[in-house]
Amino acid sequence: MTTTDERAVRAEHDREAALATLAVVRRKRLSRRLVVTIGLVVVAVAACLAALSVGDLTVSPLQVLLTLTGGGDDVSRLVLLEFRLPRLAVDLSVGVAFGLAGAMFQSVLRNPLASPDIIGVSQGASVGAVAVLLVAGVSGPLVPVGALVGAAAVAGLNLALAWRGGVSGYRFVLCGIALAFVASSILNYFLTRTDSRAAQGALTWIAGSTISATYADFWPVLVVVVVLLPAVLWLDRRLGLLEMGDQTAEALGVSALRTRLVAVLCGVVLAAVATAAAGPVAFVALISGPVARRLAGDGHPALPQAALVGMSLMALADLAAQYVLPDAQVPVGIVTGIIGGPYLVWLLATGSRRRSA
Amino acid sequence: MSAPASPAQATDPTDPGQVPALRRAPLSRKLLMALVLLALLVLACAASLAIGVREVSLPTVWDALWHPVAGNNDISVVREQRVPRTLVGALAGAALAVSGALLQGLTRNPIADPGLLGVNAGSSLAVIVAITVFGLGDLDAFVWFAYAGAAIAAALVYGVASTGWEGATPVRLALVGAAATAMMTSLITLVLLTSREALEQYRFWSVGSLNARGVGTVLLVLAPLVVGMVAALSATRFLNATALGDDLARGLGQNIAVGRTLVIVGAVLLAGSATALAGPVAFVGLMVPHAVRALIGPDYRWVVPLSALGGPVLLLLADVVGRVLVRPSELEAGIVVAVLGAPALIALVRRSKAVSM
Amino acid sequence: MSATDTVAARDGAEVPSLVAHGVSLAYDKQRIVHELDLDIEPGQVTVIVGGNGCGKSTLLKGLGRLLRPDGGRVELGEQDITTMSSRAVAVLLGLLPQSPIAPEGITVGDLVARGRYPHQGMFTRHSSTDDQIVAQALADTGTADLADRRVEELSGGQRQRVWIAMALAQQPKVLLLDEPTTYLDVCHQVELLDLLADLNQRTGTTVVMVLHDLNLAARYADRLVVMRQGRLLCQGTPRDVLTPATLQEAFGLEALVVDDPVTGDPMMVPVSSRRRPRS
């Protein structure tokens, strides 16, 4: 029989021990986050430098920095500022947007396969873009506008159809899939009813390409990312709580309905503008989230890290896309699709090893 | 990674809110649905035989089937074109729907479809190889490549997914399937972008059409298709048990490994046969089993046979609509089917009671 | 000792009342709870009991604002709970649902710290007061030595205690718990209920919980609420409520009620038709 005094002493001891462990846990978690974040920034910066210096004309990294800060010779200014920088800017902004959109969808739908192409945003954008390319027969600035209209139409329709006093993830995903199939059918119709040269052009867009990217493709994505940044920060913590179940989240003071709605809207808008700028680049939205989570390793959605993973991935893949084939550039989406496959399998393999340990 | 959202995730017997989902449709309702679907199937077959660019009256169709007279144009159209076409539609539709039912049951995921195992992408990649490497251009010649591609892709996906101590769990299957599909799609796009000849031939095959397959093709795939159907029917008890979770299924005396293998072999044989017959037709495998479950409940002893009736109805009706819509030209069934089926799926989803994420 | 007191003791803030006025609750038009009136005594331990499917978990969800009443209203501190913001409710009222989900990879310390969420602003970081409270919650639930473990590595019983710790870290004035003793062995069940009783005594926190074990319910409840088919059958002190007649009516169970040899509370002993006294 322990006396109350003994119990009080033991409780006090436990509390002190818990306090110490908590400090260690927090320090470990924060330092791991910091290391991961810094590491990702380093990778992203390195990818940027590589993307800017490698090419038909090699510009040394030093020269790159000089040129970016206003110096440099005329040739490197032309190559960097007119050709390589706009393309890189599109890569980075699109990577951020896809990374965030995918991580949000996966968190809010509690489904590791959730991404913009599951809910029809990618297909809607493709139909819009291909309609402009093939039916109207024009290219240039109208193509992203068409893509945006297509994505917005599918996403809006999806939300309207799935809304019944709230968005249930199940209804949202299934309606999205149904709409995605309809959009694919229309896309197939366009592709089979045109001559094969035009179809090939459309196919390049559908694969996701930044070959002809300009600053005009970059600004809209940047503006949307910056405008939505507060919402992303607002969501970062709430999504983590929502992952514990609607009821637990509500009990902790998080409105499940509002959080989910904001996340879905942000995700749709980010995915739509990114797709409009570069086409539906495969896999970036799907793997950025899980990779960031795995790296941070603390059971949190890790939205900022997902954005960093997305941009590094885009920059590196687009660099590789220029050298996959000896005589031609391939769309960046082909590279992300091919490297994404083994990567996902690797994630799976390491995941199960830890669980079995 | 967390499991894909499944409406049956938290089944708590003490929570009365769960009860409606578990309620089963009475036998009379199932029988009625079976009879309705059977009647619709007969109607769809009749429509498929009679309607087209050349209208043929039903008595003439009857004569063509049972008392053919040589030299009559109507009769030869029916016998030489519409009978094979209707057969292809009926068999491919049934195969796709049953394959989808098997995979949805196995993965406990209502959005699974035959494409899940990489079957469609595998077939497509093999057809690309047939076109570019072997220089084949005949649709009938694609049959074996489509088959082989489906089998290799599924074996690969299943093989990779089953490494690890826990075996090919539904989540692992879904993720590996998605990864494999994305990789193969990227490779396909890469080839199509570099070879216009390949695109020219591939795009018509890839849409999915019931046309242009002779009775010979039907006979070729008949044996694997029948084996697949037998596997499907014998796996229904396993699917009912596995719906309750692997542990409970094991407790009910099911051998998980044998059951899974049976389901996957059946699903691949069926999906491969369908792709060989009609190209990679999407949506049928997703929608039909989903609709059937919504109408008669989750008992797979009924879901599988009723899907086998519903699949042909949807695919044949899509084909007939495609013949009528843009006369004298035609729309491929693969294009029409999603446009026709999506509104029905969305209506079902909106009606459903599932409210969780 | 003083640190314990400052963390645990309340600033004397009043414990809000929690009252249900003719509340009906439904899932998709299927009514589970019918026009129920219930006045939860502030500062007391109320235990809701009843047979499977009688609507006790549903009632708890209604009281905790997780389910919107489709008739009547629930008032927390004399304010209609549906008109309050999620966070305003969460500061006053905590609820532990039956099956919460632990995100993969999260540590016990992080999970319990999430209980502090309603007390933190948009940009305020975790403060040292938060740490003290979280440490106290871990110590109280006997999970202090688990703080650096991942939640998915724990046993069912450990996990349950961690979730309770999260609810304690929230420091609500009213704490609702849906079968908190699930997954716990007998020893941990008693420990947990002792802890809740202690919390109630020390800080005056109102505790409302659903329990299956009638004898534990009788021992720890100030008030016992018995439900049957979505309605209130009776309520009162365990002594008043736990009678053979009520047991027969609520559970259809033939049972004797005797005095608990340890505490003198009423204790029920089921009479089974299969097992007769051994000779």
Image: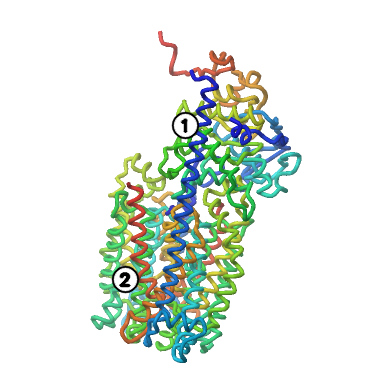
Q: Are marks 1 and 2 in contact (CB under 8 Å)?
A: no
Work out whether residue B232 can be spotted: yes
Residue drawn at point x = 30 percent, y = 79 percent = B139
| B223 left or right of C156 in image | left
Viewer-side label of 1, 2: 1
Q: Secondary structure at mark 1?
A: loop
Residue drawn at point x = 41 percent, y = 75 percent = A333
Q: Nearer the viewer, residue A107 or B299?
A: A107
Q: Residues within 10 Å of mark 1 (few under 14, many from 20)?
A: some
Q: How many marks?
A: 2
The answer to whether B35 is drawn above or below residue C110 in the figure is below
Marks 1/2: CA–CA distance: 53 Å
Q: Which residue is disc 1 drawn over?
A: C184
Q: Amino acid at mark 2?
A: Ser
x then y, percent, for residue C114: 55, 46
Work out whether residue B42 can be spotted: no
| C143 left or right of C64 in image | left
Q: Nearer the viewer, residue A231 or C218?
A: A231
Q: Residues within 10 Å of mark 2 (few under 14, many from 20)?
A: many
x then y, percent, for residue A164: 62, 57
x then y, percent, for residue A206: 45, 78
The answer to whether B141 is drawn above or below residue B166 in the figure is below
Chain identifier of the residue bearing label 2 in the image: B
Q: Amino acid at mark 1?
A: Leu
Residue drawn at point x = 57 percent, y = 80 percent = A145
Q: Which residue is disc 2 drawn over?
A: B123
**The disc label shown at residue A177, or none:** none
